[in-house]
Amino acid sequence: MAELSAESGIPVATIKYYLREGLLPAGERTSPNQARYGEEHVRRLKLIRALVEVGGLSVATVREVVAAVDSDRAAYNVLGVAQRALTGFKAEVSADDREWAMGLLTSLAKEHGWKFGPDTPVADLLVGTLCTIRALGHQALLDQLGRYAEIADRIAEADLDTLEAGVSMDRIVEAAVVGTVLGDRLFEGLRRLAQAAETARRYTEG
């Protein structure tokens, strides 16, 4: 375990904690007090660290995500499990507001060829967000929803373009999860840079 700690850069105490919490698979037992760990353990530790420290996910959420990555289900279904674990926001909305938001999202999904319905992992997140925007009176933001959807399509293409041909299913799902958590953080930072630049271009005199 000391070698695993040295190679991954994660303290032994943290590795033991991840093992106890079921986030990291056990190593191959070589003696009553020793186990052998391989490259897959190093990769998993780096994934866990990224999800916890950069992605800001709880240990319980990370446990759901890695369980989905380790399952043998189809990539689309596994990604759905991961997205449910990653999506925690759920605003309280009225039945009328939910109907309005679902109608808007269903139409948008049809236009872009997305699968969407009440059971879609991000449905509550999107419904709550749209209803909150409307309640705050930001109609101009809602009017740009189509443009945001077009950007989302391009980002999804970029996410999947990062995968090498012929990689295993677990790597595909792992990449999708990492792209969702860390890609969101990356895009958030880039968006703020772009907003600052665009604000300066539009409103700075001289």
Image: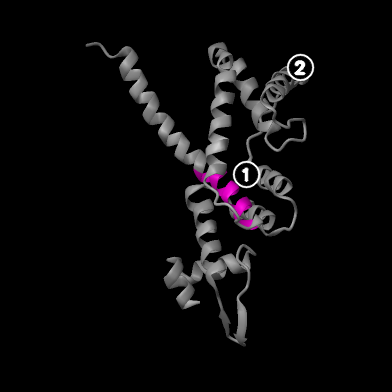
Does 180 appear in magenta?
Answer: yes
Q: Is residue 85 left or right of residue 201?
A: right
Looking at the magenta stretch, what is its main secondary structure?
Answer: helix
Does 31 appear in magenta?
Answer: no
As helix, strand or loop, the secondary structure at mark 2 comes to: helix
Residue 130: where, in percent of width, then height?
A: 63, 22
Q: Crowding at label 1, few (<14), some or many (≥20) Cα neighbours within 10 Å? A: many
Q: Is residue 190 left or right of residue 176?
A: left
- Amino acid type of disc 1? Leu
Please state, as top left, top right, bottom left or bottom right, where the C terminus lies in the image. Answer: top left
Q: Crowding at label 2, few (<14), some or many (≥20) Cα neighbours within 10 Å? A: few
Q: Is residue 162 above or below residue 124?
A: below
Q: Residue furthest left?
A: 206
Label 1 vs label 2: CA separation? 27 Å
Residue 16 visible at all: yes
As helix, strand or loop, the secondary structure at mark 1 comes to: helix
On the image, numbered disc 1 is attached to which residue? 86
Residue range corresponding to the magenta coloring: 170-182
Q: Reading the chain from its start, which is encountered first: label 1 or label 2?
A: 1
Of residues 133 and 108, the one nearer the viewer is 108
- Amino acid type of disc 2? Asp
Q: Is residue 188 above or below residue 175?
A: above
On the image, numbered disc 2 is attached to which residue? 96
